[in-house]
């Protein structure tokens, strides 16, 4: 980029108005750039080795100044419960995708680099090939190349989640759909909560009850082996059904066995969807007890575009709750530490941000 274009960027002006005008003394240009930079300077990329840097402040600033992400830690960003462009009672009446809430959250992704997580119920109502084509593809689909998805229960309203697997293959492959990858120094685990949930009838009502179900044995054995092979200092997992939720669906005790494994092997963060709201919990153990030493910090982020759900019984350790603003959760995955930020759609005012250290 020409030097005059950088000057234009710093002055927040179209580059043509700077580059195409008559030459000015170099000293005058440098003064103008310095003044503009001081008036609205983005956060500098945080040092990977300096815990005192405000990683959360930097992360919140990234959507406003995406180029500030250069040199910073990897970013994982996304939500669940995303693309709806028709009502189930009237599937022939299609809302233009650019008018949907999924488009509003996709516009946030447009401004945030990194890896995108789609945390299940990605294409309503049935997760069918046409749902992905009509509702998801025109919105979040423009970030498909950098998306690492998880399936939800609505995907399985199409037998075998065939629409989901056809769309995201080979990143998420049938029949299991669970996998893992590394992002910077972090290990990332993506689970299929639906195969665990559906193998645990009837609905479970306690953590002890959740431990009695058969569930998806093959997936749990894979999870144990994967975490044994990848002994990263920092690990995050995401899947659709939340073990802890104060929302309409409530805590999904069918996920108890997942949480027991994740906690025993030192996982730091879990992200889920399913309840159409945002909720952040303090670090806790699989029973829901506060555990600031080894506990998992859990986020429910079902705010990708579906209609909101109400909060019901507020659980212990629930620290932040939002159910009136669509948005995405961004996570900066630093060396032995992380930061989070709930980024609302344009016009939204509800926010949440903070940071933590890996176990």
Image: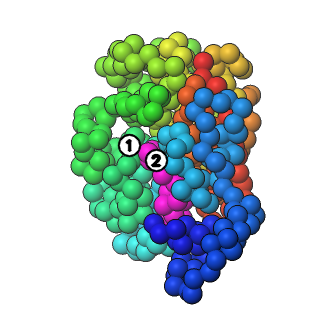
Task: Give 333 or 315, whichever is nearer the viewer.
Answer: 333
Write down the region rendered in magenta: 102-117
* x then y, percent, for residue 211: 50, 15
Depicted 49 relative to depicted 156: above or below: above
- Residue drawn at (45%, 33%) of the image: 184
Left or right: 142 in relation to 257: left
Residue, x 54% and y 42% (percent of image)? 72
Where is residue 316 drawn, in percent x and y? Answer: 74, 28
Q: Secondary structure at mark 1?
A: strand
Give me the residue at 50% from left, 57% from top: 109
Question: What is the image's colouring?
Answer: rainbow
Left or right of 93, for residue 271: right
**Residue for badge 2:** 114
Q: Which of marks 1 and 2 precedes in the sequence?
A: 2
In depth, the one of 56 and 39 nearer the eye is 39
Res. 87 visible in picture: no
Residue 151 in which image quadrant: top left
Which of labels 2 and 1 is toward the front?
A: 2
Left or right: where does residue 160 sit relative to residue 205? left
Secondary structure category for the residue under label 2: loop
Residue found 52% across the figure and 44% down from its top: 71
- The residue tagged 1 is 148
Whether 268 is drawn above or below 169: the answer is above
Identify the image quadrant of the N terminus: bottom left
Is-magenta flag for residue 108? yes
Question: How far apart are labels 2 and 1 at the CA level?
Answer: 11 Å
Q: Is residue 155 magenta?
A: no
Q: Residue furthest bottom?
A: 22
């Amino acid at each position: 980029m020409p030097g005059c274009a950088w000057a234009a960027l710093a002055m927040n002006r179209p580059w043509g108005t700077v580059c195409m005008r008559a030459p000015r003394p170099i000293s005058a240009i440098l003064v103008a750039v310095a003044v503009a930079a001081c008036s609205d300077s983005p956060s500098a990329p945080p040092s990977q080795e300096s815990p005192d840097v405000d990683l959360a402040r930097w992360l919140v600033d990234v959507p406003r100044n995406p180029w500030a992400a250069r040199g910073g830690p990897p970013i994982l960003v996304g939500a669940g419960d995303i693309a709806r462009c028709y009502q189930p009672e009237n599937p022939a009446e299609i809302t233009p995708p650019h008018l949907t809430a999924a488009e509003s959250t996709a516009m946030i992704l447009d401004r945030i680099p990194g890896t995108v997580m789609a945390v299940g119920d990605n294409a309503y109502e049935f997760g069918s090939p046409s749902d992905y084509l009509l509702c998801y593809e025109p919105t979040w689909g423009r970030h498909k190349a950098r998306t690492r998805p998880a399936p939800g229960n609505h995907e399985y309203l199409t037998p075998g989640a065939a629409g989901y697997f056809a769309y995201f293959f080979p990143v998420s492959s049938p029949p299991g759909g669970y996998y893992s990858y590394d992002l910077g120094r972090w290990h990332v685990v993506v689970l299929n909560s639906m195969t665990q949930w559906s193998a645990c009838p009837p609905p479970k009502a306690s953590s002890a009850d959740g431990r009695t179900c058969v569930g998806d044995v093959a997936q749990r054995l894979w999870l144990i082996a994967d975490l044994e092979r990848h002994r990263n200092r920092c690990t995050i997992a995401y899947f659709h059904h939340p073990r802890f939720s104060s929302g309409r669906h409530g805590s999904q005790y069918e996920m108890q066995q997942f949480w027991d494994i994740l906690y025993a092997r030192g996982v730091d963060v879990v992200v889920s969807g399913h309840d159409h709201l945002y909720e952040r919990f303090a670090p806790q153990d699989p029973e829901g007890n506060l555990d600031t030493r080894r506990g998992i910090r859990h986020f429910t982020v079902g705010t990708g575009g579906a209609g909101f759900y109400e909060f019901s019984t507020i659980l212990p350790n629930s620290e932040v709750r939002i159910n009136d603003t669509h948005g995405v959760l961004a996570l900066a995955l630093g060396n032995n530490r992380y930061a989070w930020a709930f980024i609302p759609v344009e016009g939204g005012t509800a926010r949440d941000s903070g940071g933590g250290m890996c176990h």
